Amino acid sequence: MRYATVVLTWTADELDSIDGAFARSDAVSIRAIRDLTLVDDRRYVELLELRGDLECGRSLLAGAPDALEYAVAGRNGRGHAYVTCRSVAPVTDLLAILREHEIVLDWPIAHIEPEEWAGTGCGLEVTVIGTNEAIQRAATALPEGIDLTVQRTGEYDHPGRGGPTLTPRQRDVFEVALRDGYYEIPRETTHRELADRLEISPGTVGEHLQRIERNLALSEAEFSG
């Protein structure tokens, strides 16, 4: 089993509207993609790690045509955005390539933006896992306009830095909590209100939220370490 860490870059004209908006902002940036799931051929959901002015991040998402729904939570310039996105190239192309060649992603995916780009481009540092042949085939199948630079490759024999490992039920609870304003300051909902919405007990809501927050905190520590 092999791994490859690569940097994928786009020019400004090829940025999707969400990445493009954040790439051009000096106030807030996307630090990493913590998770990304294809819902169907029209939508995907992603969990973004944000740094900077979170209110500006909300405004950027509100003005992004490809952000169908979103919720932002955090404080002191550190937060997360849960975004339902319209499927657009090159994101859907990249997901299709990974699926076709049976490639596994090692989360998180780091956003990078060298200073010399000055908001005209954006890049992702991605670690993929698979057979050597599958990784090579996937690399040659990249859409036109996406540049690939190999950072390092080797045998994958231990877990890397992972994203937040949430169960499907925890994802449901987290999504509802974000959208209902549980992480806003002041909070816009309570455990009991979330429990009524999710049809579970308030105690179970609290347990889920504690586990979610612990997983996110551990993942952040691993990524920063």
Image (tube, rainbow, N blue to C red):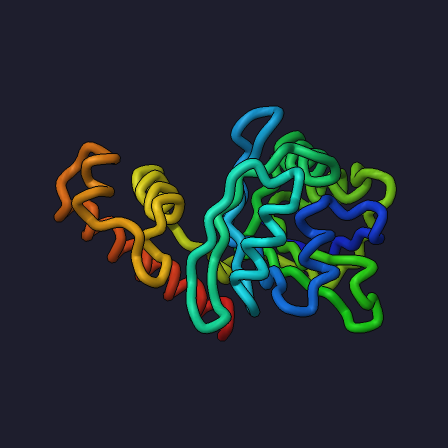
Considering depth in this image, is 175 or 111 the residue closer to the camera? 175
State which quadrant residue 170 falls in: top left
Considering depth in this image, is 124 or 195 the residue closer to the camera? 195
Apparent side of residue 159 relative to residue 60 in the rendered image (left or right) = left
Residue 220, position as x, y percentages in the image:
45, 66
Q: Which residue is depicted at the point 77% across and 48% down?
A: 15
Which residue occupies the extreme top position in the image? Answer: 41
Considering depth in this image, is 110 or 59 the residue closer to the camera? 59
In the picture shown, does residue 185 fall above or below 139?
A: below
Q: Which residue is depicted at the point 78% across and 54% down?
A: 9
State which quadrant residue 99 falls in: top right
The reply to whether residue 105 is visible in this rendering is yes
Residue 134, position as x, y percentages in the image:
69, 39
Q: Which residue is depicted at the point 24% across and 42% down?
A: 194
The reply to whether residue 5 is visible in this rendering is no
Apparent side of residue 193 relative to residue 33 in the rendered image (left or right) = left
Residue 91, position as x, y percentages in the image:
68, 40
Q: Which residue is depicted at the point 35% across and 57% down?
A: 183
The count of marks equals 0
Apparent side of residue 103 relative to residue 144 in the rendered image (left or right) = left
In the picture shown, does residue 32 fall above or below 196?
A: below
In the picture shown, does residue 34 fall above or below 169?
A: below
Apparent side of residue 121 relative to residue 49 in the rendered image (left or right) = right
Residue 102, position as x, y percentages in the image:
61, 35
